Image (tube, rainbow, N blue to C red):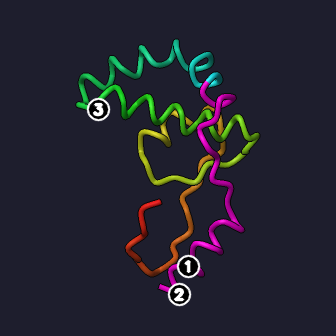
Amino acid sequence: EPERMEIFKMLREMFLFAPLDVEAAILAAGRFSGKMDAARKKSENEKFPRDAIKVDWQVIACALAKKCKVLYTTDKRLLQYASSELSIRFPPDVGVQLNLPNF
């Protein structure tokens, strides 16, 4: 448990965990509504639910609303959608897999 809390503390100091606030929600709705239709059509072929795609766009909007320049992710769809909006990087390997608590 103490080791886990140290890792959380380090992550909070290094990264911004942007919330889906009103600004991000408005940005997601306005900026990505046209792109959503194309993503939805593609997802029908790849079996991605509409809600999963919507959440991907909301994550991107959260980063943009907070003026982030880099998005750290291992999510392949998010990599594809965000690459024209943000610089994408894979998170650093911490070397230890922990069970994270639910917040």
Kindly state the secondary structure of the residue where label 2 is placed: helix
Q: Is residue 15 magenta?
A: yes
Kindly state the secondary structure of the residue where label 3 is placed: loop
Residue at the location (59% across, 38% down)? Answer: 20
Q: Which is more toward the observer, 62 or 37? A: 62
Give how far across and how far down residue 4 sits, in percent: 50, 80
Task: Tell me which label, 3 or 1, sits earlier in the chain.
Answer: 1
Label drawn at residue 61: none
Give how far across and how far down residue 77 sits, in percent: 42, 39
> Magenta segment, which residues?
1-25
Residue receiving disc 3: 48
Task: Tell me which label, 2 or 3, sits earlier in the chain.
Answer: 2
> Is the magenta region chiefly helix, strand or loop?
helix
Q: Which is more toward the observer, 80 or 58? A: 58
Give how far across and how far down residue 24 sits, in percent: 64, 31
Q: Quadrant of residue 48?
A: top left
Give how far across and how far down residue 97 sits, in percent: 40, 76
Identity, as a three-letter code, of the amino acid under mark 3: Phe
Q: Quadrant of residue 65?
A: top right
Q: In which quarter of the image is residue 45?
A: top left
Residue receiving disc 1: 5
In this rendering, the answer to whether 24 lies above or below 34 is: below
Q: Nearer the viewer, mark 2 or mark 3?
A: 2
Which residue appears farthest toward the right when viewing the image? 67
Identity, as a three-letter code, of the amino acid under mark 2: Pro
Residue receiving disc 2: 2
Identity, as a three-letter code, of the amino acid under mark 1: Met
Q: How far apart are marks 3 and 1 (CA)?
A: 34 Å
Q: How far apart are marks 2 and 1 (CA)?
A: 5 Å
